[in-house]
Amino acid sequence: MTLKSPKELKKNVFARMMYCFGELCTVFFLTVGGAAMFVLAVLIAEELIIDPESSAVGADVLIFSYGKLFLAAAAAAIIIIIAVTPLSYGVGWYRIQQIRGVSVHARSIFSCYTSSGKLWQVLRLNSILIIKKLYIVLPLALIAAALFYLVGLAGNVVENVIVYYMLFFGALLVTFCLIVPALMLNVRYAAVPYLYVLGSDKTAAELIAESKRIMKGKGKYIAEVMFSLSWWLIPCLIIFPMIFIIPYIHMVYTAAINEIILDENIEEEHTDGSVNAEVPLTV
């Protein structure tokens, strides 16, 4: 089967979003709420941990304070990830059902919270995915952090502002060049959540292996689809259009993953030919 072009995907998504636009906007606000909670938690931790006069006491005290702030931010991130992971899998199931023309109730996005078994499954699966992605992201992130640290040191030595900004934008360019390969390498795991929510009875290891198999060579297709949406990001600078644009982008991305899954003929169908529209099954 030939994969649909980005234009065809976007046309199909526009047709389907009229049936679920309100629900997708609600998901957007829930996501923004989670991000706001994390930022608020970090700001509160900073107020409680960082002493404004600590720099006068000594560098060791300041380093210790920021170390505690980092641990607090990491703890907040872990708590929020645990809280929203079941929601993200439910949302993934909801989106792919809408893409496939199956209208489902909005409460289905909370289906992974309905049993401790499902809750544990998605948390375990997502934890494995995060660890695997960190193998690639963490070393690159450390390189980028080291670059900006060196630029900061150079800023204290170099008196020429132009030279400093050249170094800064050079570090930004290198960071961007590191982000691209990280995304392209991690795209092999993109199908895992969708394979799970479509009702596969495979283990986490089998789902990951299946995703790597079907996504092999598909990175270019995903990149083409997402690049075709890049100009939609410009109106997002005004903030308000994000309410409409971000759900649309997520749906187009889901449609692209769905195309790849259908192309590999690994979807499980009922005997009557309809796709599995049940809540996520076991991993």
Image (spheres, rainbow, N blue to C red):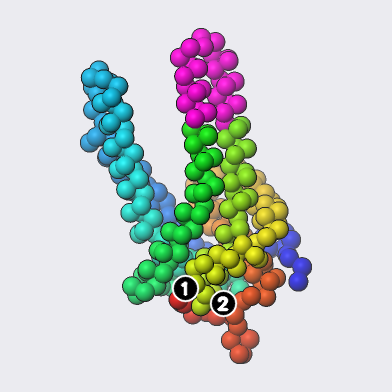
Amino acid type shown at disc 1: Val
Would residue 107 be seen by someone viewing this image from the given angle?
no
Residue drawn 49% across the image and 30% down it: 146
Residue drawn 61% across the image and 58% down it: 188
Q: Which residue of the protein is positioned furthest toward the top in this rendering?
A: 159
Residue drawn 35% across the image and 59% down it: 83
List x then y, in percent, for residue 72.
30, 43
Is the residue marked by circle 1 packed among few (<14), some (14-19), or many (20+) residues within 10 Å?
A: many
Q: Nearer the viewer, residue 31 or 139?
A: 139
User: What span is in magenta?
Assistant: 146-172
Q: In the figure, is residue 102 to the left or right of 221?
A: left
List x then y, in percent, for residue 124.
41, 64
Amino acid type shown at disc 2: Val
Is the residue marked by circle 2 packed among few (<14), some (14-19), or many (20+) residues within 10 Å?
A: some
List x then y, in percent, for residue 183.
59, 49
Q: Which residue is mark 2?
A: 102
Asked whether residue 181 is drawn in magenta, I would say no
Would residue 89 be seen by someone viewing this image from the given angle?
yes
Q: Secondary structure at mark 2?
A: loop
- N-terminal label among 2 and 1: 2
| Mark in the foreground, 2 or 1 | 1
Q: Which residue is mark 1?
A: 283
**Secondary structure that dominates the magenta span:** helix
Q: Nearer the viewer, residue 214 or 99?
A: 214
Residue drawn 22% across the image and 36% down it: 48
Tell me the quarter of the image containing the N terminus.
bottom right
Q: Is residue 161 above or below residue 273?
A: above
List x then y, in percent, for residue 269.
60, 83
